[in-house]
Image (tube, rainbow, N blue to C red):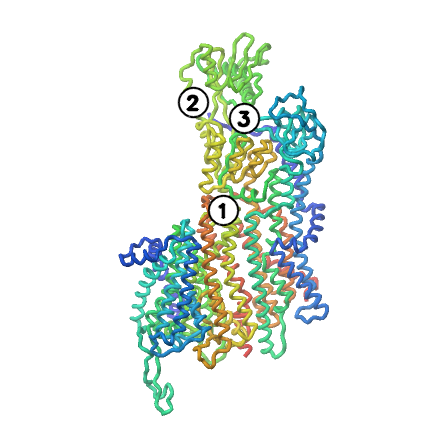
Amino acid sequence: MLQFQVWTLPVLILTATTALAIPLSRYLAWIMDGHFAPPKPLTWIEQRLDTGAQNWKQYAVSLLLFNTVMFVFGFVVLTLQPVFGLNPDGKGMLAPTTIFNSAISFLTNTNLQHYSGEQHLSYASQIFFVCWNMFVSASVGFCALAAIVRALRGDARMGNFYLDMWRVVAYIFVPAALVMGILLLADGVPMTLHGGASATTVEPGGMGSNDAGQSQPQQIARGPVAAIIPIKHLGTNGGGFFGANSAHPFENPSAWSNMLTVVNYCLFPFALVLMFGRMLKKMRHAWMIFGVMMSIFLAMTGWAIYWDTLQPNPGLAGLPVDQHLGNLEGKELRFGTSAGAAFAAGTTAITCGSVNCAHDSLNPLAGITPLAGMWLNCVFGGKGVGLINMLLYLIIGVFIAGLMVGRTPEYLGKKVEAREMKLAMLALLVHPILILMPTGLFIASDWGAKATNNPGAHGFTEVLYEFSSASANNGSGFEGLGDTYGNNDNPNPAPYSPNWDIATGLVMLFSRFIPIVAPMALAASLAAKKPTPFTVGTMRTDTLTFGLVLLGTIIMVGALLFLPVAALGPIAEHLGPTPFGG
Amino acid sequence: MANTFIIEPQSGEQLAQDLKLGRRASRSGGLFQPELLKAALGQSVLMLRPDVQWKNPVMFVVEIGTVLTLIYTVAKAAGYESAASLNYLVALDVWLVLTLLFSNFASALAEARGKAQAESLRKTRQETPAQLLRNYRKNGPADFEHNDWRPEWTDSSRLQAGDVVLVEAGHVIPSDGEIVAGVASIDESAITGESAPVIREAGGDRSGVTGGTRVLSDRIVVEITAAAGSTFLDRMIALVEGASRQRTPNEIALTLVLAAFTFVFLMVTATLWPMASYVEHYMTGFNGTPVRSLGTDVPTLVALLVCLIPTTIGALLAAIGIAGMDRALRANVLAKSGKAVEVAGDVDTLLLDKTGTITLGNRHATQFVPFGNYSPGQLAYLAALASGEDETPEGKSIVDLYRQLRTSQAADGDYGNATVLVPPGAKFIPFTAQSRMSGVDLPNEKALRKGAPDAVIKYVDQKGGALPSGLKARINSVASKGATPLLVAEGSDVAGIVVLEDVLKPGIADRFQRLRQMGLRTVMITGDNPLTAAAIAKDAGVDDFLAEATPEAKLAYIRKEQAEGKLVAMMGDGTNDAPALAQADVGVAMNSGTQAAKEAGNMVDLDSDPTKLIETVEIGKQLLMTRGALTTFSIANDVAKYFAIVPAMFAGTLPWLKTVDVMNLHSPTSAILSAVIFNALIIPLLIPIALKGVKYRPIGADALLRRNLLIWGLGGVVTPFVGIKLIDIAMVALHLAV
């Protein structure tokens, strides 16, 4: 039974998701290629939105324009929270830096939360800011991928951004979220606009007493949770309605809902790889990419489960604690013993950022898995952008390996030359730089060193994790950082929280849009080239050999850059005495 | 009867081949000839100048780091407090400087080799006296005996394009030009190494002459096409020497990738400093006593940076490019740019002339087909008589075949037994373009004619003779087998057909097989009719053919291929080839060809060897492969270097990271130094690979990729683990490790 739960369950979930992703990918390609003829009122909307086929610059400008408007909108909604209505619990205004951070965070599909949902957000903010952004930000990445695929297959234009957005939101995410919402409602996830429930505790005075000596009722936060959770996962957003995210029983009531959650966040990233193959009419190539992603995914999940679920918690070593179920600190046992580690691996590889266990409490070496997932940022990755990142690794792999067969490197029959390499390197290297630079800056100054709960290697990991999460547009937290300012009138905010708000805000912004726009330019540049015919002298990109090249490129270019910080963080913590520092 | 057969190369050809190979071997010499080494060594010190290094972003970063390390060493010697010992810093300095020198040495050696190569060509470019003809009128009659040309002696260096010079037997042609009058035999061995003289004449496609070659007989009037110093060869020499070498598109792309890697590794190491300082801070708090690690020591961070950035390929990149040009030159192909060599590797379609490339230049008689009352022996005898004084290879082959048959079938009296074939008093009728037949008028007034079927038929008609029945059908059946029929007529009677066949070059089908495995399509270009062309194409195993090819048809074919995205290479010599040569992505002009052809192409083959295209493609592929292989190797090396350096850097603060040091190196400083030394030493060790190139094998892209991944990828991961450990062991053994 234990073995079933530890290994078989994760494997079954992945197999089921892959099986679902195959038909879904057909549907996605069908929608994105415009084969779906919607009923009249919807056609009318499409006609209003369709401003005509766009080249890459027009597409990129539309995308950036849309995001600018969304940023302003998000900023206004959060700022006006106290006066906006739908605020039964009378939530106040967040600190401006936190609003800045959150507006970017949700815009960029990151959902890094320097606030706590049930404490700081009104229902209006949850619906019009959080839920709205979850739909559109996921769609933005999706659209960018669709545009890139069209360019790669040689279409003259990349499609129309506004029409793509409409199709993704209306025909893909809304129906999927409705289905999932009903399933979650059935499992007990609340859906209400009433304010927090007030409950009399069974034990009198369980929540303390007032000055008059009467027992305080327990305030139980609730709200339109079931509306948000489906798209939170389907769109790989990950921002929780509650601070405790998917560990909270209202977000994730049971082992069944936990499995649904994993299927939800895996489903679209899996299907998008196959959609890529269908739209290109190169399924073998897509399966090769899928295979590479899946092998890294399995390796990372296996690593996390091995080091966390199958190893004792070193902090409890020597104490009279039964550790045969592995490290149980920070886990929700209603999901199963390996569910925390497996969920952590998936949510970071797929840059969802939803969490159902405390990543802070994973055994140190198991903590490498979520970090590595975010560092690579292409093991399925976020909606659309994960595959775009993978394409960048692929281009670099093609360039170096392509030379080794004695020809100018080609991808999909197009020559890869200086301009493409410039754009690929730019898009790919933004990510490590935006992790390492701020980590170095913060850790050496009070901003970071004084914000960590734990000094030493663990504190280092907390800082590293935060920037990795921001740059990967993941949004999960290792936690343990004083990065929450809270309401604007909070008399005792965490001292360096504005620094964290601004720094991670900027990191999220740059590592979202540079790796979207540069690859679009790259794809357009390839599209403009004349295709070269395929000969036996051409390197194939759909073989096992090329899969190994791709894997090697990801490890050499993506992973090794982070070996020094991995050594200073989780590895030093694992090997060193516990706890050092103090 | 097989309609083609293969014969061994004639001994003369074999000899020329041997000579060429021998000369090439002597010219290439060893990779490390002492005089080249000496020149390169001096040059590598001079190349330390920052403005030279600036062109190579990877090595420029190494240079900056080296300077920084030197400053720290001086500061340490002056008493500056640091976690590193002075000896360690000095050792680091030495190896960093050596890294730079090794890199410079690689490019300097490649350049020196190119220069040496160029020097041997330049010997042909010495000042020569020239007879300038001021009065020569280009379109006037060219009469060598009676003219008012007034030759005037001048120096070759004063000649301008457009000048006209007279070159007589025994004189050296002063500069590149085109013959406008006369015909001469010319010794081009200075350029091509071929000892056999070649004929060059005004008009037609063999009018180009090269400066530095010698007129052996007769005299010619040459219009100079390039002033001294700007001839084709001069431009090529400059390219090989590296003076005017421009980076190729692929080289630029790769440099960009390397620069990006360098930048990101710079970030990795630069951000390590504050991180290491944080570790020192908390470990000091934990231990209660101050601790330092090499992680905050700038020279050590420089060492890490230098090890991580792709110095191996960065150091060898220029050398690989120069060596590619050099290899082309060694094959006697002058490329107008490095780009041309590189593009050759990408070629998809090869247009090859049938004659000289696929078949031996000449057709051979293989069969006699008699008509009417003639026996095979009689026909053979008549044909041989008609060819008795025919010096063309076809004519000689008829006589040869006749002699052969007479020996083997001596019993048959029909073959005649005359030892002197052509009786005295016979009048030989030479072949002309108008009559399209040749023959002999015998003293007994019997006229023999042989020639193109329609010409002979017309001749017989005029004589009032009757054509044998089925003649046309027989002629067509011969043609459809890829052979050329010649009709032989005795007086007004058609005696029969001589079958002339193309002879495939030995091993040509294998070569095409090899090309197919390289992913190349071969197209045969021929003036033959489609029937004949199809038959030869099938035998030779080419993928396609272009029959009755006109220059326009060639151009159209190239454009059609290019429209499909293919890169096309072709070889040509004539002026009418010039448009096609210019249109082709790789146009190789033969040195014997016209100036127009040479200007239109982007390479010139000094040997005028039509099979050279194949070699050129391989050189291009080798160039790209060498870059890819060494880049892979360079990046793969990083794994071991991380494992050596990272634990060493933090040995002072996080001693337990030693577990990560899988090589179990002696001490932190020996670990870092071993990695730096390995990083430096690998450069000179790979110079031979960079200069010779990674061997190309036509085994298909997938197999080639697997092979190179195994050697350079996996090898690149494993080698430094072994190398660094060995260096560490050696340092301990020599008591150099602290």
**Residue underneath mark 3:** B362
Position in image of residue B447 (x %, y %): 52, 11
Hey, what amino acid is under mark 2?
Answer: Asn
Query: CB of mark 2 within 8 Å of CB of mark 3?
Result: no
Q: Residue furthest left?
A: A40
Label 3 SS: strand
Hey, what amino acid is under mark 3?
Answer: Asn
For disc 2, the chain is B
Label 1 SS: helix
**Residue underneath mark 1:** B701
Vertically, is B598 above or below A204?
Answer: above
Q: Residue furthest top?
A: B444
**Residue underneath mark 2:** B476
Give the mark, 2 or 1, whose residue is nearer the N terminus.
Answer: 2
Q: How many other residues sit within 10 Å of disc 1, few (<14), some (14-19) or many (≥20)?
A: many
Hey, what amino acid is under mark 1?
Answer: Ala
Q: CA separation, marks 2 and 3?
A: 21 Å
Give the mark, 3 or 1, whose residue is nearer the N terminus.
Answer: 3
Pointers 2 and 3 within a single chain: yes
